[in-house]
Amino acid sequence: MRPEPPPLPALTRSEGELIDCYLEVVDLLGRVNPSRGTDTYGALRAAQALVGRALALREALTVMHLRGETQLHHATLGRALRVLDGERRSSLAVVAPAPEPPAP
């Protein structure tokens, strides 16, 4: 049985939307990543969805800015990302490590 994750830190509604949109974009980038993907159709579908999620991310940041939330509280937002498995999810968007050469 997996241990229960720590609770999410207190976030404004806008910060929560920012985190959700950001992670959705990261997940889609991971699916598009040519160093990890296996087929063009899946990557194409992810790229098509990425456009809409990027717009939602922009909208979340716009709402924050218009409400006067002018600073990103990186420590709190970083904690929220870690609780939501953001480290693993974002690692899928980077170039995959080179495979180990076969042993002689």
Image (cartoon, grey):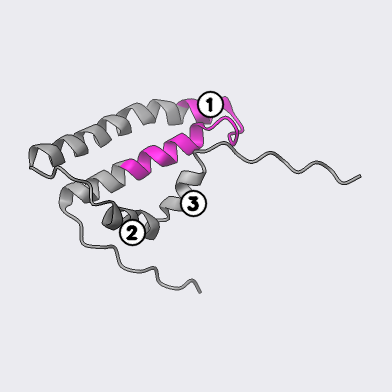
Which of disc 1 and disc 2 is earlier in sequence?
Answer: 1
**Mark 1, secondary structure of its residue:** helix
Q: Which circle, 1 or 3, is nearer the viewer?
A: 3
Between the residue at mark 3 and the residue at mark 2, the CA separation in whole angstroms equals 14 Å
Within-10-Å neighbours for mark 2: few <14, some 14–19, many 20+: some
Q: Is residue 97 above or below residue 39?
A: below
Say which amino acid is labelled 1.
Tyr
Task: Name the residue tied to disc 2.
Answer: 79
Task: Name the residue tied to disc 1.
Answer: 41
Task: Name the residue tied to disc 3.
Answer: 88
Say which amino acid is labelled 2.
Arg
Query: Residue 17 appears at what percent x and percent y?
Result: 23, 46
Pointer 3 and pointer 2: residues touching (CB < 8 Å)?
Answer: no
Say which amino acid is labelled 3.
Arg
Query: Residue 24 appears at what percent x and percent y?
Result: 36, 41
| Region in magenta | 22-44
Camera-side residue of 66 and 46: 66
- Residue 92 magenta-highlighted: no
Query: Residue 66 appears at what percent x and percent y?
Result: 9, 37
